[in-house]
Image (tube, helix red, strand yellow):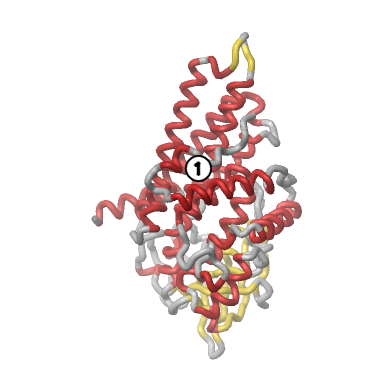
Amino acid sequence: MNDLANSHPAELDWPFFEDSHRDFKARLDDWCKTHLAHAHHDESRDAMDAECIRLVRLLGAGGWLKYAVSGVSYGAASDVIDTRQLCLLRETLAFHNGLSDFAFAMQGLGTGAISLMGNADQKQRYLPRVASGQALSAFALSEPDAGSDVAAMQCSATATADGYVLNGRKTWISNGGIADFYVVFARTGEAPGEGLSGSPGRGAKGISAFIVDADTPGLTIEERIDVVAPHPLATLQFDNCQVAANQRIGEAGQGFKVAMATLDVFRTSVAAAALGFARRALHESIAWARSRQMFGQSLGDFQITQTKIAQMATLLDAATLLTYRAAWLRDQGTRITREAAMAKLCATENAQQIIDMAVQMHGGMGVKKGVMVESLYREIRALRIYEGATEVQQLIIGKDLLKG
């Protein structure tokens, strides 16, 4: 098989990138080939927990986590997150090892609210430890009855003389059970009401964001959740969990704004992760088509194989263009709610098609446990759901176009 990942793929010559991004990608590829070539693949829960922690430490020691946070004085690579670097990181890590992408992404998503809207004290207490890989973070937004519909949130934070008391549940929380702290969104004002994710309605008001350390009394792990592509995931329970006032991020009632600002950054990076999985599937398919012999010729000699490879490459390029358009626009200071939604929708849906074609091309080997395309098939499915399902992205795009 050819070497994994060209250090200077053709898309880096597109005008979305600068020379610094090209150098960054080359360094990252070299690091991944050295450190992720023999990554652990035991999928038991304890093994996944340990491997995720190890990967966070490894990414921190390698200097890559500093690109997931902002503020040079807090251990970050720059004062503003470079969205293109963020996306190149997720795409490249996903290409090499899915769990390493997860480990990196949760460090960024879990601290995105602190990077964007935290005060100096909060940034100093949490960001350096995250950037160095010494602390694991998590983003606790979803609830049993409030996933895509954030405005239906019921977890409450009642103000007291000393701060707030949190009560309720959060579920589908990545890094749940291993995180050192959680950024938790809870209702401090109005009662729940109808409202679509991305569209602040009556029910979106009165939500606030809090940093809750994992050892805070009243916070427990109610359930660990196992999914098709194993990674640390849990339901959190808050029972009279007391949080100091200085742990609130931003102003009271601004939590919806904090959450949406965080997702605007990291939703584009989800698209980039999908690109990484899809690009690996295409890479594996080309190598398989060249080496697999049948009926006296290689699989790649059949026209049906060539048409599938062409379709996969075209779907991948289309998604790549939308993803890095969104990343480039955000780095120019443009609000990208619609562009990020388009990127995530296209990249995750296209990647699902590409990987499905790769599995089909591999035949029986495509569904054998431990084969790369089988792993990719399980990895990609969740990306069409988390951080806003495909259907929610369609609604965001349509509403934005009609409003404009």
Is residue 217 found left or right of 299 in the rendered image? right
Image quadrant holding the C terminus, namely: bottom left
Up-down: is 78 above or below 314?
Answer: below
Q: Residue at x 53, y 38 (%)?
A: 278
Q: Position of residue 192 (x, y in %)?
A: 43, 69
As rendered, which of 336 and 217 lies closer to the eye?
A: 336
Q: Position of residue 244 (x, y in %)?
A: 57, 83
Quickly name the residue at label 1: 275
Is residue 402 found left or right of 337 in the rendered image? left
Q: Position of residue 38 (x, y in %)?
A: 72, 43
Q: Residue at x 63, y 13 (%)?
A: 294
| Type of amino acid under label 1 | Leu
Q: Residues within 10 Å of mark 1 (few under 14, many from 20)?
A: many
User: Taking the image as drawn, is residue 228 in sight?
Assistant: no
Q: Residue at x 62, y 62 (%)?
A: 235
Is residue 312 found left or right of 29 in the rendered image? left
Up-down: is 357 above or below 340?
Answer: above
